[in-house]
C-alpha cells in the first residue's frame, strides 16, 4: 500500500476489545502503518483471548499496551502514565472493534482497564466501531449507550448487516478494512483546508446511447476524478461525485451516477449551483446520436454499413460558468490533448471562464487515460503556468484540491 498524505505521521491510538472481529483490526493496523500512520495499539484482556499482542506489534513495529498496572519493558511508555501519555498528542483514538461491554463502560465513564481509562484521559477525537451479535447490538441497553456516546460527539462506524460468527444474520459485523480506513481518513480530515466547503467533482467518460444496448464512449477511466473526490474528503469537504463509472466510492462521498452528457449537464448544473467549487474531470462527449433507436438496431441482409448522425452536446463547464450567480465560486477544467497542448488549454481556460485548467498530453503512453499516473501543466486565469513532473493521480488530485482551497480562502 502506498503512503496516504492524510495518514502520514498521524498518531492513532487503536483500542482493540474482545470480539472475533479482532482479526480485522490486525489488518487495519497493518494498512494504517503502511500508509504512514503511527499506530499505538491498546488491547483488553478479552481481545488477547483472540489474538496475541505480538500480532499487532509485528504489523505496527511499536509496543502494544495491555496492562494498566504493570510497567512496560522496552521502548513503550511506562504504563503507570500510559493512560495519559497514549492520549496525549494523539490525532485519533479509535476503538475497533468495540464490544457492548466497552461501549457501556465508555457511556458510563467507567475506568477499569487501559482502554476505558485512556478514553477518559484522552482529548483526541474518539471513534468507535461496534462489532457484536445482532441481538446485542439492537438491544436497547446498547442502543442507549450509543446514543449517549453520539451526544458527546463520538464518531460511530455503524456495523454492517451480514452473517455473524454465530451463523445468524443481523447488524453487528465490523466493516471491511477499506471502509474503516475511509472512515479514519474522513475523521482526520474534518478540520482540513476545505472544512465547511461543498465541492462537486465529475468523473469518467460519458455514454451516448445509440439504441437500448449500445453507446458511444471514450477511454477515460474516471480514476483522476475519484482521486480528486478522495483528496477533497481528506481536506474536510462535503463532496458530490457525478460519475459514469463503477469504481469504489470513497467514504464520505455522495455519489450521483449518470450516463450521458445530457444527464451530466442536468445533475452538474443543479449541484454546482449549491457548491463552492466545481472540478470537471469527466471526459464529456462533444457529440451524441441525433436519435436514439427505440429498439436494438438489427443488421439487414446485404447492408454494407450504417451511418449515424450526431449532434453537438452542451458544453457543461462553459454553460455553468456563463450563467453562474454566486456559486460555484471556483471552476476548474481539464484539457486532454494529443497536440498543441498549451495553446488549446489556454483557449479553453479563457473560453470556459475557468479559474484554472489542468492540461495533460493523452498521447503519452505513461500518463493520462486509464493509467495510474499523470503529467500535467496547470494554467491559471491569473496567467501562471506550472509544469508538474510525472506523478500519481493521487498527487495530482492533492495539488488540485490544494489550489482550490487556496482560491476559496483568498475569496474569504
Ligand atoms: N467539457 C464540458 N462539456 C463538454 C465538453 C467538455 O464540460 N461538452 C469540459 C471537460 O470536462 C473538461 C473541459 O471541458 O473539463 C475541456 O474538455 P475537452 O474535451 O478537453 O475540451 P472540449 O471543450 O471538448 O474542446 P475540444 O473539442 O476543442 O477538445
Image (tube, rainbow, N blue to C red):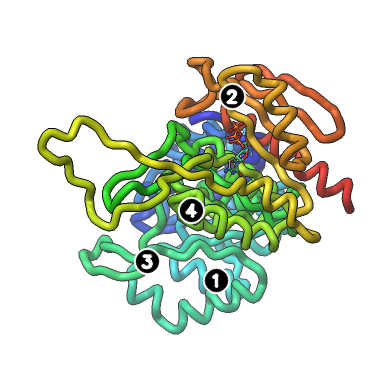
The first of marks 1 and 3 along the sequence is 1
Q: Which residue is mark 1?
A: 105
Question: How crowded is the residue under tag 2: few (<14 C-alpha within 10 Å), some, or many (20+)?
Answer: some
The first of marks 2 and 3 along the sequence is 3
| Between marks 2 and 3 in the image, the one whose residue lies nearer the viewer | 2
- State the image coordinates of residue 288 (x, y, percent, origin top left): 45, 45
Q: Are marks 2 and 4 in contact (CB under 8 Å)?
A: no
Q: Nearer the viewer, residue 315 or 143?
A: 315
Whether the residue carrying mark 2 lies under 8 Å from ligand 1 is answered with yes
- Residue 332 falls in which quadrant of the image? top right
- Is residue 308 shown above or below 167? above
Query: Distance from label 1 to label 3 (Cα)?
Result: 19 Å
- Is residue 110 shown above or below 178? below
- Residue 362 falls in which quadrant of the image? top right
Q: Nearer the viewer, residue 397 or 58?
A: 397
Query: Distance from label 1 to label 2 (Cα)?
Result: 59 Å
Q: Which residue is mark 2?
A: 337
Q: Which residue is mark 4?
A: 16
Q: Which residue is mark 3?
A: 172
Query: Distance from label 3 to label 4 (Cα)?
Result: 16 Å
The first of marks 2 and 4 along the sequence is 4
Residue at (38, 52) in percent of width and height: 291
Query: Distance from label 2 to label 3 (Cα)?
Result: 50 Å
For this view, does 257 lie left or right of residue 295? right
Residue at (69, 61) in percent of width and height: 273
- State the image coordinates of residue 375 (x, y, percent, origin top left): 61, 21
Question: How crowded is the residue under tag 3: few (<14 C-alpha within 10 Å), some, or many (20+)?
Answer: many
Q: Dot 2: what SS?
A: strand
Q: Are marks 3 and 4 in contact (CB under 8 Å)?
A: no
Amino acid at each position: 500500500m502506498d503512503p496516504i498524505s492524510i495518514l502520514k505521521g498521524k498518531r492513532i491510538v487503536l483500542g482493540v476489545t474482545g470480539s472475533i472481529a479482532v482479526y480485522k483490526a490486525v489488518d487495519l493496523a497493518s494498512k494504517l502503518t503502511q500508509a504512514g500512520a503511527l499506530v499505538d495499539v491498546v488491547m483488553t484482556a478479552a481481545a488477547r483471548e483472540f489474538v496475541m499482542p505480538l500480532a499487532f506489534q509485528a504489523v505496527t513495529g511499536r509496543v502494544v499496551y495491555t496492562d494498566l498496572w504493570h510497567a512496560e519493558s522496552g521502548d513503550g511508555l511506562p504504563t503507570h502514565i500510559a493512560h495519559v501519555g497514549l492520549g496525549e498528542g494523539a490525532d485519533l483514538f479509535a476503538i475497533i472493534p468495540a464490544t457492548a461491554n466497552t461501549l457501556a463502560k465508555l457511556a458510563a465513564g467507567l475506568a477499569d482497564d487501559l482502554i476505558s481509562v485512556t478514553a477518559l484521559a484522552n482529548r483526541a477525537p474518539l471513534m468507535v466501531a461496534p462489532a457484536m451479535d445482532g441481538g446485542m447490538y439492537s438491544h436497547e441497553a446498547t442502543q442507549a449507550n450509543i446514543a449517549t456516546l453520539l451526544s458527546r460527539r463520538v464518531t460511530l462506524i455503524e456495523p454492517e448487516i451480514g452473517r455473524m460468527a454465530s451463523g445468524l444474520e443481523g447488524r453487528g459485523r465490523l466493516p471491511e478494512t477499506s471502509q474503516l480506513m475511509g472512515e479514519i481518513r474522513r475523521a482526520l480530515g474534518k478540520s482540513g483546508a476545505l472544512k465547511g466547503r461543498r465541492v462537486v467533482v465529475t468523473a469518467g467518460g460519458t455514454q451516448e446511447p445509440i439504441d437500448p444496448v449500445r453507446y458511444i464512449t471514450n477511454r477515460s477511466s474516471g480514476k483522476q476524478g475519484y482521486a480528486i473526490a478522495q483528496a477533497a474528503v481528506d481536506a474536510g469537504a462535503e463532496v458530490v461525485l457525478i460519475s459514469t463509472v463503477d469504481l469504489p466510492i470513497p467514504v464520505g462521498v455522495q455519489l450521483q451516477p449518470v450516463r450521458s452528457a445530457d444527464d451530466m449537464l442536468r445533475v452538474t448544473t443543479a449541484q454546482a449551483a449549491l457548491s463552492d467549487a466545481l472540478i470537471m474531470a469527466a471526459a464529456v462527449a462533444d457529440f451524441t446520436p441525433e436519435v436514439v433507436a427505440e429498439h436494438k438496431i438489427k443488421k439487414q441482409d446485404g447492408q454494407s454499413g450504417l451511418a449515424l448522425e450526431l449532434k453537438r452536446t452542451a458544453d457543461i463547464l462553459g454553460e455553468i460558468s456563463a450563467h453562474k450567480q454566486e456559486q460555484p465560486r471556483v471552476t476548474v477544467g481539464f484539457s486532454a490533448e494529443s497536440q498543441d497542448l498549451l495553446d488549446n488549454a489556454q483557449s479553453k481556460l479563457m473560453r470556459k471562464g475557468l479559474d484554472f485548467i489542468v492540461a495533460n498530453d493523452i498521447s503519452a503512453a505513461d500518463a493520462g487515460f486509464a493509467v495510474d499516473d499523470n503529467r500535467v501543466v496547470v494554467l491559471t486565469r491569473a496567467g501562471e503556468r506550472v509544469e508538474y513532473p510525472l506523478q500519481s493521480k493521487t498527487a495530482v488530485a492533492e495539488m488540485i484540491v490544494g489550489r482550490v482551497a487556496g482560491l476559496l480562502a483568498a475569496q474569504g
